[in-house]
Image (cartoon, rainbow, N blue to C red):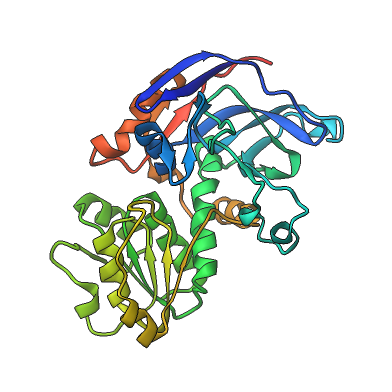
């Protein structure tokens, strides 16, 4: 099959690689769409994210969807032909984290495009059969792929305990910030304020569910009067984190989901004195059924986020678009379709 491999930082190349061999519990998916994530861009530019380093050629891409074309021995053959959204991970299913439902923290987790596990910028990908979720016919391939970032947003709002009447501040109107705004609205938040320096992104997120937008270059949310129940950083920018924490009410929650600086100065006294619960988000657990239902019912719009589409041969351009095109929201790679 054809696949785009990261050979070294800044270099990707399309070449022929073997089709993944299936285990008895896996399915082979002919990939129809793959979203480009910020983590893909980090690996492409830097060759690592934290202690996860690329040492050998790696297929990037983990926001994926497609059609099942083959199944392992323990998987019913009637699944062949199903359109599916891929939850791109495999846990051990036996450690304390897996058994308690927190399989995202499994020390032996295998996650698409997290070295050394290959991802989905390819014609085919193999995944555990119960992590390939059937999607309705009216859900597009691109929306099926973007169930992954939507799952991050669902996990974020669950962690933040967003409930009817919650007030939420979000820093960053990129894909995750936009989706957190949509999910927070569905969870019942009555005030959703999003801060982003880009005017077109502020305009987009207003249409997506935010009730108010701010320009961080001129507006300080902590000086608006009432403080927020929840602060979500979807930017990874240290100034945004600092400003956002100042805007959290006593007993509130702050969730760090954005990827950015590995070290950030925190207002420790403020966090202590207000008893702010500060935590991170690492992927998700048990979110796909909810994500699919939200999209299938029309409550969440994923298709409108897609601003750029690329072929498998254009993965490098896809990886650069987010930082080079200020009007980019979400890029999607469309691998070639072959008869099977």
Residue at the image position 33 percent from the left and 43 percent from the top:
329
Foreground residue among 201 and 125: 125
| Residue 101, picture quadrant | bottom right
Q: Position of residue 323 (x, y in %)?
A: 27, 38
Residue 303 seen: yes
311 sits to left or right of 323: right
x and y percent of residue 90 in the render? 68, 44
Residue extending furthest toward the left: 218
Quarter of the view holding residue 22? top right
Q: Nearer the viewer, residue 125 or 208?
A: 125
Residue 201: percent from left, percent from top: 27, 52
State the residue at coordinates (33%, 55%): 236
The residue drawn where x is 53% and y is 60% is 154
Query: Number of numbered discs present?
Result: 0
- Residue 140, visible in the rendered structure: no
Q: Nearer the viewer, residue 330 or 53?
A: 53
* Residue farthest to the top, as pictured: 16
Question: Where residue 29 appears, x then y in whole percent?
Answer: 66, 29
- Name which residue lies at 26% across and 57% down: 202
* Foreground of the two, 33 or 271: 271
336 relative position to 262: left or right: right
Left or right position of 331 against 88: left
Image height check: is 257 above or below 279? above
Q: Picture quarter containing residue 139?
A: top right
Say left or right for 88 vs 323: right
Which part of the image, by quadrant, shows the N terminus?
A: top right
Above or below for 31 versus 207: above
Which part of the image, by quadrant, shows the C terminus? Answer: top right
């Amino acid at each position: 099959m054809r696949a785009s491999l990261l050979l070294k930082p800044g270099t990707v190349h399309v070449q022929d690689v073997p089709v993944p061999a299936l285990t008895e519990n896996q399915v082979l998916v002919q990939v129809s769409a793959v979203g480009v994530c910020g983590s893909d861009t980090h690996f492409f530019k830097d060759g690592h994210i934290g202690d996860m380093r690329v040492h050998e050629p790696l297929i990037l891409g983990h926001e994926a969807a497609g059609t099942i074309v083959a199944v392992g021995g323990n998987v019913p053959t009637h699944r062949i032909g199903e359109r599916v959204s891929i939850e791109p991970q495999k846990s051990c299913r036996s450690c304390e984290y897996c058994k308690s439902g927190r399989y995202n923290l499994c020390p032996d987790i295998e996650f698409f495009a997290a070295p050394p596990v290959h991802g989905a910028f390819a014609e085919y990908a193999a995944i555990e059969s119960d992590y390939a979720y059937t999607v309705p016919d009216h859900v597009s391939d691109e929306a099926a792929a973007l169930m992954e970032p939507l799952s991050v947003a669902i996990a974020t709002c669950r962690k933040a305990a967003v409930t009817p009447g919650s007030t939420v501040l979000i820093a960053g109107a990129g894909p995750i910030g936009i989706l957190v705004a949509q999910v927070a609205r569905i969870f019942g938040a009555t005030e959703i304020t999003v801060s982003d320096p880009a005017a077109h992104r502020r305009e987009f997120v207003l249409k997506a569910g935010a009730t108010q937008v701010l320009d961080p270059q001129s507006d300080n949310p902590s000086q608006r009067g009432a403080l927020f129940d929840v602060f979500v950083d979807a930017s990874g920018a240290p100034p945004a984190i600092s400003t956002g924490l100042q805007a959290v009410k006593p007993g509130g929650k702050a969730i760090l989901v954005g990827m950015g600086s590995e070290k950030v100065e925190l207002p420790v006294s403020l966090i202590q004195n207000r008893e702010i619960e500060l935590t991170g988000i690492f992927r998700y657990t048990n979110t796909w059924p909810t994500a699919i239902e939200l999209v299938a019912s029309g409550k969440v719009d994923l298709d409108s986020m897609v601003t750029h589409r690329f072929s498998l041969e254009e993965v490098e351009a896809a990886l650069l678009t987010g930082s080079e095109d200020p009007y980019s929201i979400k890029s999607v790679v469309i691998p070639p379709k072959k008869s099977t």
